[in-house]
Image (tube, rainbow, N blue to C red):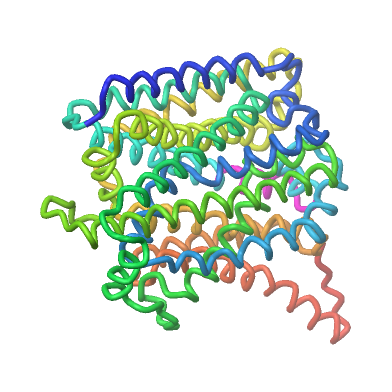
Amino acid sequence: MLGFLDWLLISIYLAIVIGVGIACRGKQESADDYFTAGGSFSGPIGSVLVGLSIAATVFSGISFLAIPSVTYEHGPALLAGLIAFPFAWFVLRYWFLPRYLSEKIQEPFGILQKRYGQATRQTAAIMFVLLRLGWMSALIYAPAIAIMGAAGLGDQWLWPVVLVIGLASTLYTVFGGIRGVIVTDAIQFLVIAASIILVIIYIFASLPVPMGEALGALEQQRKPLNFSFDFTEKLTIWAVIMGMIVGNLSSFTADQMSLQRYIASGSVRSASRSFVVNVIGVIVVLMLLISIGVSLAMWYTVQPDGALPASADKVMMYFVATELPVGIAGLLLAAILAATMSSMTSGINALACAVCQDIGGGWTKKLSDRQQVLMARWTSLIFGLMATVVAGMVDELGTIFTMSQKLLGVFLGPLMLGMFFAVFHVRIQGKWIILAMVGGCLCGWVVIFSPIYGLWVAPISFVTALVIACCPIAFDRTAGAFGLNRGVT
């Protein structure tokens, strides 16, 4: 169980993050400054901060708990997903970022309005709000349950723990804006990496048998990698590769949390540099989290524990509560809070941006700069409170990894379709883009309730949206070939 030193470390961490987040808020003279920092993170240090911020946002508290549990149960199959990051970097560096930032827009989804009208932009923003509000609720709930398990707290502690996580994240997001979020995210990334490394070192140093013997014993019990093309089988290599390619690419090109940071970078060069830092950081943390899963599997293979939880999602917190020494346990829980709060703050700020600039862009532009900042802060506060309250009422997440991948896949795949069409100047009517994005989402929801494995949701929803969007384009070309000159605008 957690000792006094553990609780002291967690408390100090929370105080430091809140203080830094508020201290780095800047002048915040306009809504653009509040949401995108006016492109002020353009230098080398700014690029590093933005890159680490994106990396910290990608690895939420859900990822911190889910990736080791998936690796513990199924082996290091997620390593196959590393191929997604060089692919994403190539697409962003040479195709997406130069075109996206050349538009000189100051609002993440502004390019959708420029190409396909306000209704398309508002539809995308509503989809994003639905995605991130539900995601943030799960984001708070999962680490809260983990911390309660590690600390030996009963169910009556759920609301206090949820409130501490949710309100602390909301507090410095409301006042810090995107500047406070980016700086604190960078700090939190370093805390995440350091704590994971310490845990891995402790496990390796504490194994009662040599490393080679532990790996040999683990290898005898592990199933071989699954290369099946069956969409219903869990964690096949093809599901990992396709799911992570589409999932990561959509997160980097269609998620407001990433798009805000590209604009904050100020230039293609700075944004590309930030993305390289992000890719390196994400790969490092992903490999470290997979290493924790392998390490836990080795530990309990050579040291069986009759009280070990049956659910893989609970194994890491059981290890924290029963094996980690005082101090390291507190640092690890602080890292889980860091992963949670970095994603939470980014989500709050992005949601407020979607409402103020995308959904209500027409009438919010009539407000003064000061009024726009106040509206941004109040919207951030409302979303933070909403996510916190919903998190306290969540009863069951199921398998954390699968649930998170399904939720992201439903919305981000179709949103990526809209952003790609806008960036590459595809000539099509806005109503068809809206139909394609909505149709892709609906297909994704159908897949969620089918036997198909969760990693396939993003590829399927994206392909569905693409097929719908291509129908009027194909029809227009066919009509043109017959001299009907239907025309698509």
Q: Quadrant of residue 146?
A: top left
Identity of the residue drawn at 70% across and 26% down: 363
**204 with respect to 301 (left or right):** right
Identity of the residue drawn at 37% across and 79% down: 224
Q: Position of residue 399 (x, y in %)?
A: 31, 55
Q: Is residue 162 magenta?
A: no
Q: Which secondary structure type mostly characterizes the magenta part of the structure? A: helix
Front residue of this view, candidates 379 and 298: 298
**354 with respect to 402 (left or right):** right
Residue, far bottom: 482
Identity of the residue drawn at 36% across and 75% down: 232
Residue 432 appears in the rendering: no
Magenta-highlighted residues: 115-126
Q: Quadrant of residue 365?
A: top right
Q: Position of residue 335 (x, y in %)?
A: 44, 35
Quarter in which the N terminus is drawn? top left
**118 with respect to 65 (left or right):** right
**288 with respect to 144 (left or right):** right
Count of marks overlaid on the render? 0
Residue 150 appears in the rendering: yes
Q: Position of residue 140 (x, y in %)?
A: 39, 35
Q: Quadrant of residue 234?
A: bottom left
Front residue of this view, candidates 29 and 161: 161
Identity of the residue drawn at 80% across and 28% down: 40
Q: Position of residue 468 (x, y in %)?
A: 62, 70
Front residue of this view, candidates 21 and 390: 21
Quarter in which the C terminus is drawn? bottom right
Residue, far left: 306
Q: Is residue 149 above or below residue 253?
A: above
